[in-house]
Image (cartoon, rainbow, N blue to C red):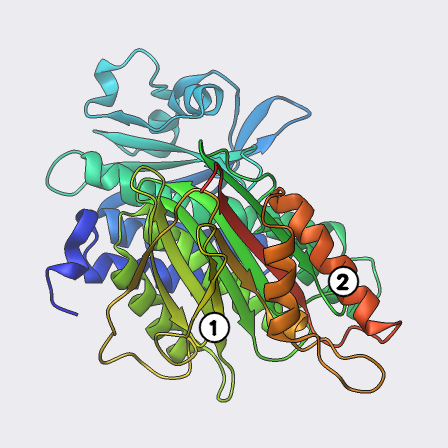
Amino acid sequence: MNEAHLHEGRLSAGDMETLLDVTRALAAPFDLRSMLAEVTAATLRVLHAERASVWLLDAAAQELFIEVSSDLTRVRVPLGAGLVGACAISRQAINVPDCYADPRFNAEVDRRSGFRTRCSLTLPLLDHRDELVGVMQVLNREGGVFDADDEGLGLALAAQCAVALSRVRMTESLIAVELVRQELELASLVQRSTLPAVMPQVPGYDMQGFFQPAAQTGGDTYDLALLEQGLLVVLADATGHGIAPALSVTQMHAMLRMGFRMGGSLETVFRQTNDQLAHTLPDGRFVTAFVGLLDPASHRLRFLSGGQGPILHHQAASGACIAYRATSFPMGAMPLHTLRPAVELTLAPGDWLVLLSDGIYEYADAEGAQFGRERVEALVHEHAQGSAAALSQHLMEAVRAHARGAAQEDDITVVLVKRTGSA
């Protein structure tokens, strides 16, 4: 990967490494103050600022209170008051180059702390359900004021902080529960919270995602999300079952989303995420993952696959089902020194992209006979005229009928993307 690729979309290699370090750090601690201290420290490093603070939302009181700051005890402000209150109401970043010239700025905090605020960047903390959980404020950029690039980096950090805040609060609410069950429930909540709440609405396309773990938590994940680069399509499967694989795919999921939201290319984000996983995952742990970007205007899909396959492209015109193999070894198995070119394909009207985890192909009946790829392709061909939701349901019904009561041994994940219209 040359240096130019690492700077696509204003994303430098250093910025990516720092942001991935934040993601990794936030995957570990569950203590609120420790987690927020990690966020503020990273914010100061990335944005080259003098002060950073996190204000948490007290929804019942309709107030924001400061939780982490280097020189203030707990302070409360009503929603709408000051820059942090205005940010909470608007849910938009507020970049002020001269705070004392802005009528929304509340100088009382400066007077109490003895700190002199020049410029500020105030960012909403929105969780995975787009609900406000707090506000992050960064003060006094070294050598000038905050620019558009700083806003982008700040929003990426704020997104990580918001997700971590939601996770911490879930942890605190389950403290009284028996330890093993608490850990399982938490891992399941964290994992499912990363899945799309609703399918993205893309004109000319129908899509469906489905996840059914073999146990309370699983090692699979998927994503379908509209980004600036196009429709992000992800299916991933971590080795093993239980909490550890669930955390692995959740970590990978967060890295991918953050990298793409920062403007990274498919190749940059894939390679950086792989190398970070290789650095952090224990020996013998890895994640098979399909990562693709679909341009809904040109109907071209570009993808890289770390050990995930087969990748099925059902062509409506011919009725053929083209299978693609992985482009590299599983993600996290080792650093990527070279990267094969991304696979490109075009979805014609009526075509399907079919991504299934091993839980479908390898689901065995009592005699050990697996469901297999041939049954999958036959089902896709038979129901190609229907909707993505209907095909997902037909697949699950067929798998259950094949199993004849045999237990589910592996996680099941289904991702279907269909270009609507006639061939």
In the image, 89 versus 405, the foreground residue is 405
**Position of residue 269 measured from the top left corner of the image (x, y, whole percent):** 31, 60
- Where 271 falls versus 198 (above or below)? below
**Disc 2 crowd, CA 10 A, few/some/many (<14, 14-19, 20+):** some
Q: Quadrant of residue 71?
A: top left
Instruction: Judge from the rendering whether residue 245 lies leftward or rightward of residue 318; answer left or right.
Output: right
The mark lying in front, picked from 1 and 2, is 2
Contact (Cβ within 8 Å) of mark 1 with mark 2 = no
Q: Amino acid at mark 1?
A: Gln
Residue sitting at x 72%, y 75%: 363
The residue that mark 1 highlights is 308
Q: Earlier in the sequence, mark 1 or mark 2?
A: 1
Residue shown at the point (63%, 80%) measured from the top left: 240
Q: Extreme front residue here?
A: 318
User: To which quarter of the image does residue 198 belong?
Assistant: top right
Type of residue at label 2? Ala
Residue 225 - label: none
- Give the alpha-carbon distance from disc 1 to disc 2, as whole Å: 22 Å
Instruction: Estimate the x, y position of residue 1 in percent, counting from the top left.
Output: 17, 70
For mark 1, give the secondary structure. Answer: loop
Q: Residue 303 in the image: state x and y as whole percent.
A: 35, 61
User: x%, y% of residue 356?
Assistant: 58, 64
For the point 47% across and 38% down, which residue is it? 422
Mark 2 — residue? 398
In the drawing, does residue 401 fall left or right of residue 220?
A: right
Closer to us: 228 or 144: 228
Q: Nearer the viewer, residue 246 or 143?
A: 246
